[in-house]
Image: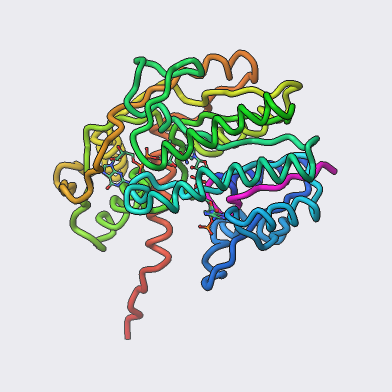
Amino acid sequence: MPKALITGITGQDGAYLAQLLLDRGYEVYGLLRRSASAEVVGERLRWLRIIDHVTLIDGDLLDLSACIRILQQVKPDEVYNLAAQSFVAASFHQPLLTGQVTGMGAANMLEAVRIVCPGARFYQASSSEMFGKIQEERQNERTPFYPRSPYAAAKLYAHWMTVNYRESFDLHASSGILFNHESPLRGIEFVTRKITDGVARIHLGLARELRLGNLDASRDWGHARDYVHAMWLMLQQNKPDDYVIATGRTTSIRDFCSMAFGHVGRDWRDHVVTSAELLRPAEVDVLHGDADKARQKLGWKATVTLEELAAEMVEADLARHRARIVVPVAS
Ligand code: NDP
Ligand code: GDR
């Protein structure tokens, strides 16, 4: 039975990846940081009904000794480094923490792998945010980077450390440059989920408006389930490499609003209000990926359309809120 260690297993991608690896017969271990609200932290793993099938080991990416201890304990064949402070907006308020976790945290894992299990295959969760102020209309593995946030700068450091450890120490280390991917398990602070949750609340009479920032930005959005499959494919290759993973379609926040409100027969313009407080100090205006290399070398392509994704997310949020509404019992 192959063994995999996932950092960030409690996040959106960690949960879907754990499910994919379990389905493929892996023993799955996850690094879990200590929380005073432990019952909330495993929510996504519970939602997928896999929490009892994974082994969670306490540790923190910031603690190199913990990373070493966990690798010594697990002796993994594959390590997926997904843990990060992953919210771009928060990185402007917490730039140093973001640098520590998202940047140095990856270096800690690489160093721990080099010391403990240099034969293990390593995946680094890199990001399309590294392209930032885009230098080419469509971004691929050869497009120059231009990070626009402390988050993106930290990811760029982690990306180059991954490349460097591959070239210097011959680690089987791959970097997936993933464009935005969403799902019903997306964190509520990210714009797609904020919108689908808002649609559900408004439709059920729990809210009247939805407050958003920049509606003009465009993103290349796919489904997280497709994207964790790409992570796994990268580690099955004989040679480590870097791959862009994207759908090749870009859509504005405004058009995503239209799609999500349209799913319940509503006009987004009746409900969305914009707030200057939600604008970022520096914005990434548009991202549009070119995943041709992944298509050719990994045989990967997105299988879920944005319309299907939006519909699945709205339906999941409607179900969540309906389950919480207490219907008064007639006397
Ligand atoms: P989430 O924000 O949902 O999950 C982040 C995970 O990191 C959580 O499990 C969190 O734990 C964990 N974590 C945070 N800090 C630490 C720490 N100090 N030590 C250990 N664990 C920590 O992210 P996603 O699942 O969306 O993304 C996965 C990775 O992919 C991230 O690195 C993200 O930056 C990157 N990425 C994501 C994209 C996307 O569109 N989703 C696109 C490109 C890259 P806890 O539950 O305790 O908070
Ligand atoms: P992003 O995702 O920054 O691309 O990073 P997010 O969903 O936060 O923002 C996308 C775009 O929407 C605009 N926007 C808003 N965003 C949020 N969160 N809330 C709002 O109210 C709002 N209104 C407009 C933003 O300005 C932005 O342009 C995600 C994360 O998962 C990263 O970890 C990952 O690396 C990248 O995707 C690829």
Residue, far front: 168
Nearer to me, 164 or 5: 164
Is residue 142 left or right of 173 when viewed as pictured? left
Residue, far bottom: 331
Q: Quadrant of the C terminus?
A: bottom left
Query: Can residue 296 be seen in this snapshot?
Result: yes
Q: Picture quarter containing residue 238?
A: top right
Nearer to me, 92 or 50: 92
- Quadrant for ligand 2? top left
Q: Position of residue 288 (x, y in %)?
A: 38, 22
- Tell me if residue 2 is in the magenta stretch: yes
Nearer to me, 35 or 262: 35
Look at the image and give the residue range highlighted in magenta.
1-12
**How many numbered discs?**
0
Q: Position of residue 24 (x, y in %)?
A: 75, 39
Q: Residue at x 16, y 46 (%)?
A: 274
Residue 44 to residue 227: above or below: below
Is residue 154 left or right of 258 when viewed as pictured? right
Residue 228 to residue 6: above or below: above
Q: Position of residue 181 (x, y in %)?
A: 46, 37
Q: Residue at x 59, y 47 (%)?
A: 14
Is residue 103 left or right of 16 when viewed as pictured? left
